[in-house]
Amino acid sequence: MAVSTIPVPFQRHCCVGPGTRHAGLLLAGALLSLLIPGPGLRADEKQPTDFGRVQRATRSCERNLAAASPGPCSELRFEQNQQGLLNIRFVGPGSGEITTNLVTFVGVVKDGAAGLSCREGHCRLEGPLSTEVTSVSELGFDQRGLPTSLPSAWPADGTCTVEKHDVRCEAKALSGERWSATAEL
């Protein structure tokens, strides 16, 4: 019975050698440096965040849901998950088992405007501004505040403009659906 052996040069490549240990130490040092504040920063210093939400009641508000006739809305939410990306949500009553309905226009803030300025959990709207809408979604909630289904979402082209007291959004999906919403703050 013949026993085959692997040549010695190939065995070195399969095992951890001194070079691999050195790379591991460098990686551990790099990760540790992320935990230690750099020069000019103190560990207890609060850094500004670029995400948050602003809610506003509306004086007048109207939005449509795809092919449906326009309906009222009572609240506007501006949500920013990262700098330059702004969700504008029009919140209104639903029908049947849906007690609340959201129409959301997701857009990229144009011309380098800030969108929301957030620090330590407090945000304020930096306007006037305009967004280039990339998608629209609709979602309904029941009386307990639970979603009644998964959101319906469409890639879309359009714009939202936010002035001092007025917000206007319009978008059209590639499949033909159209949405529009206006609010006076």
Image: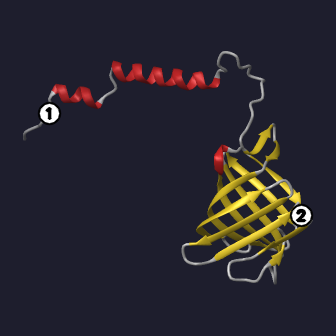
Quadrant position of residue 14: top left
Q: Is 32 above or below relative to 135?
A: above
Q: Which mark is residue 58?
A: 2
Q: Is 182 above or below relative to 177?
A: above
Q: How far across and down, in percent of the image, does residue 68 sit?
A: 73, 83
Residue at 55% across / 26% down in the picture?
31
* Sequence-wise first label, 2 or 1: 1
Q: Is 176 above or below relative to 110?
A: below
Q: How far across and down, in percent of the image, does residue 168 sit?
A: 76, 64
**Foreground label between 2 and 1:** 2
Q: Is residue 146 visible?
A: no
Instruction: Say which of 94 and 27 sits in front.
Output: 94
Residue at 78% across / 23% down in the picture?
44
Q: Is 27 above or below relative to 76?
A: above
* Outermost top residue: 39
Q: Does residue 168 appear to the left or right of 18 in the view shown?
A: right
Mark 1 burial class by Cα count in 10 Å: few <14, some 14-19, many 20+ = few
Instruction: Say which of 176 and 50 sits in front.
Output: 176
Residue at 59% across / 67% down in the picture?
156
Q: Can residue 20 be seen in this view?
A: yes
Q: How far across and down, in percent of the image, does residue 160 sit?
A: 71, 61
Q: How far apart are marks 2 and 1 (CA)?
A: 79 Å
Instruction: Say which of 22 and 165 sits in front.
Output: 165
Instruction: Say which of 130 and 46 sits in front.
Output: 130
**Colour scheme in use:** secondary structure
* Outermost left residue: 1
Does dot 2 land on a helix, a strand or a loop? loop
Q: Mark 1 points at which residue?
A: 5
Quadrant position of residue 78: bottom right
Q: Does residue 66 appear to the left or right of 120 in the view shown?
A: left
